[in-house]
Image (spheres, helix red, strand yellow):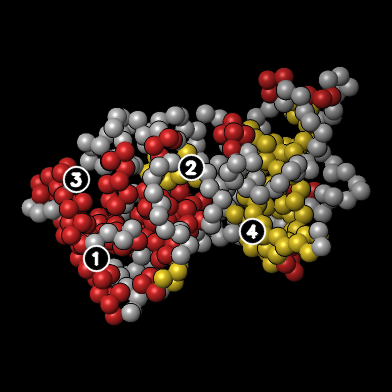
Amino acid sequence: MNQREVESRLAGRWDRGWLLGWRNITSPTNERTTMPCLLPLAGVGHASPIIFSTVEIPAIATLAAALASFALDYIARQKVGGTNFTFHLFRQLPIGFPLTAHTSLFDGCVSNWIAPRVLELTYTATDLAPFARDLGYDGPPFRWDPERRVLLRAELDAAFFHLYGIERDDVDYILDTFPIVRKNDERAYGEFRTKRLILERYDALVEAIASGEPYTTVLDPPPADPHVAHPVTHPTIQLAKVIPFPLRRLETLPEADRDRYVAIVTLKAAAGAFGDAQDVAPDGWAELPDGRTARPGMFIAQVHGRSMEPRIPDGSWCLFSSPVEGSRTGKIVLAQHHSIGDPDTGGSFTVKRYRSAKTSDDQLWSHTKIVLEPLHPAYPPIELDESAADEIQIIAELVEVLVG
């Protein structure tokens, strides 16, 4: 499915670079019944219904973990009688605790204790970098370490048994109602390892409650520690990469059919000119493909650098539209800042995904923070505080990558 089609379907409903859903086809006799998934932004069919939420990102991560827990899965098995896990059934699942509750057992907010564990379990490839960044992590993906993963999951399952108020004998019974999990464990490890690890973590949580001290993880390094991630790599920047211009190019704008042509702009030559009274002198004109009609303010520019890969490969020719219409949040924009250089190219122009925080007073609002996010996890975001926010100019929004 075309990415623009996906973005248009989500407009006004979801502005993140990832999705949370669950598998519709299931059965109470499967190894697991509730199968949630965090997945990269993409088109999905009816077999993977999507959850949209307005709560904070750590709370969404907690929701994902709750849906994957044995405690909730046991309840789901009492409700699902066939092979379709429909919205009607899904809405009946009990999330019986505040996702942002504070407790001394977890040394603060429950979501802030759970989110790092979800982060390490899910962010194992760069396609979920937007989710990692939304959780405040800008490093590379985490290594797939089976021994750490089983302990992370055991801590999460034990925590949810406590949060649901389930006593130890009942935890023991519930885990025994997952015979395929038991069979696979006994075949691989000679014991029901999943049950043993969860009960060990459950008992450790009981001891922490009795002592009045926060629970201490058995993981060393702790969950989502950068030392358990892949090594940081800094790709070589190749600013001289040349990609042939993909469209019919003219030196002057023809008299006929002018609405089929857009200006070609060289960003370095245009520095400082955007937004001024003078027009940016075009470096030629291009005919849009497929007989499309150009809108006022459209132009084509070549984007150098790797910070927006894989969406915008280095050297891509891109179609932009100016000004940016509606909310900028979540859109990929062309921005200019005269005193801050792009970490990728060093220039004053940058193409990044836009996010901001605002404050209002007497019906007037102002930016408290602007973040220009890369898509490539090896590059840092550009963060501007209130004092620098007014110095940035958002020139245009990305319409389409023509070739890259």
- Circle 1 residue: 201
The kind of residue on which mark 2 rests is Ile
Dot placed on the residue nearer the N-terminal end, 4 or 2:
2
Crowdedness near tag 3: few (<14), some (14–19) or many (≥20) residues, C-alpha within 10 Å: many
- Circle 3 residue: 178
Task: Give SS at disc 2.
Answer: strand
Task: Give SS at disc 1.
Answer: helix
- Circle 4 residue: 371
> At 45% from the left edge and 48% from the top edge, which residue is drawn?
128
Crowdedness near tag 4: few (<14), some (14–19) or many (≥20) residues, C-alpha within 10 Å: some
Q: Is residue 109 visible?
A: yes
- Circle 2 residue: 51
Rounded to the nearest angstrom, the CA distance separating label 2 from label 1 is 30 Å
Rounded to the nearest angstrom, the CA distance separating label 4 from label 2 is 25 Å
Front: mark 4 or 2: 2
**In the picture, residue 144 is in which quadrant?**
bottom left
